[in-house]
Image (cartoon, rainbow, N blue to C red):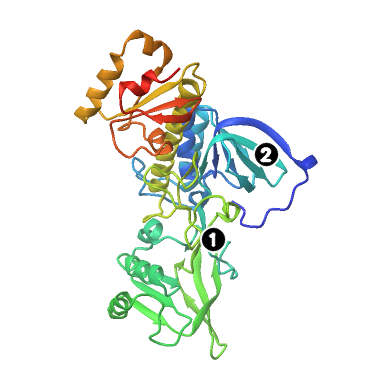
Amino acid sequence: MDNASPKKMRVSEVCVLSQYDLLIIGGGPAGLAAGIYGARARLKTAILEKGAVGGQAFTTREMVNFPGFKSTSGPELMKTLADHAKSFGTEIIKEDVVAVDLSSDIKQIHTKKGRTYQARAVILAPGSQPRLLNVPGERAFRGNGVSYCATCDAEFYQDQHVVVVGNGDAAIEEAMYIAKFATKVTVIVIHDEGVVDCNRASAEKAFRHPKIEFIWNSVLDEIKGNGEVEAVVLKNLKTGELREMVANGVFIYVGMLPGTGFLQNQVQLDERGYIVANHSMETSVDGVFAAGDATVKYLRQVVTAANDGAVAAVAAERYLEEEQSFQEEIVDAETPVLLAFWNPANSQSITMLSKFEGLDSVINQRVKLVKVDVSRKKRLAQKYNVQETPAALMLDKGQLIKTVTSEADLCEVS
């Protein structure tokens, strides 16, 4: 979302809206997929999106690599996903998130309009944006000859001339990928001849490539065309000379910017600002999940973003179920709770359960047995630092009284 530092809001300016089970920040493919899964699980779900629903994918004119769609456009596919999410009851709200407080059980999401949304679980899917050169024509031809993703668009330039701007690993590797389709790929480099920022192996391979040529000491000054890109203007940094060159497409690789500026000191980010999440899309904060291009990941594509969103929503659903069960079965229990951690693949676990289930009625009346299968539910084991099964703990209102190692420990419970 908005990378700018949020303005300070007076209490009187804040409008606290209704609480949700699941709030999703970002309405790209990751957020929309999460909305589908969240609402279908009967969670009260909303997506907060500041711009066009669909995020970066909305700007893609043609898409041919999303499973099940031989050919579609970004706007068409994103509308399909949005309609799908809304059909299950997901709310899509036009809001720009500027600050969050994720430290408590109820998460607080603050927007530019001075509103505050509350949720029991949050999925962060703010996406990322390519770093722009801001040269004339760049924005006008975006999606019509200007691209930031070779995997998405290279095949549309079969037997054409493509310009690549950039000389880092991503730029050179993508140039070689584009060369599989294009007749010619011209790489624009700001450095002196032979100097590039990518790894040496890739550089040498690109230098030898018969379809790739380099223009040194130059920058892109303008992109021209009529509806689609037809030419570029290059500027030589040493002479100041401007040179116009015919081109059918421009791929720009000068970096990406994750939309995580509002998350500083809230969740763990890597050195570039991307959200660190595990395979279940869990972040460093309990009840907060992440999905899509703003996360640390290998491939940033619509299909992988949608996958992330589905995983994050299912993980959020299970988190909420476990939290509710913890409250009802353990915290609100009228008697002390014997919390038995077991694993069906462990014979000692089964023996322990049989022993506890066979306790005499007096103990059963004074102690509530709660069984936790750690192969399915791991959060309680993590909460009480249970490393191995079988294990048993005695709790009172969720607080640890003692570790249970024998029936005598149970008899001591008054």
Q: Is residue 1 left or right of residue 369?
A: right
Residue for point 37% across, 9% down = 362
User: Disc 2 to disc 1, how far (Cα)?
Assistant: 42 Å
Q: Quadrant of residue 351?
A: top left
The C terminus: image quadrant: top left
Label disc, if present, on residue 116 of the rendered structure: 2
Look at the numbered discs 2 and 1 and tell me whether their residues touch, using CB distance below 8 Å: no
Q: Earlier in the sequence, mark 2 or mark 1?
A: 2
Q: Amino acid at mark 1?
A: Gly
Under tag 2, what secondary structure?
strand
Residue at the image point whose x is 64% and y is 47% from the top = 96
Question: From this viewpoint, which residue is outermost toward the bottom?
Answer: 239
Q: Point out the residue furthest to the top here.
A: 361
Image coordinates for residue 401, horizontal then vertical, percent: 45, 29
In the rendered image, the residue lying farthest to the left is 347
* Left or right of residue 76: residue 377: left
* Residue pointed to by mark 1: 227
Q: Nearer the viewer, residue 212 or 271?
A: 271
Query: Badge 1, how many Cα within 10 Å: few under 14, some, many 20+?
Result: few
Q: Residue at x 80, y 40 (%)?
A: 12
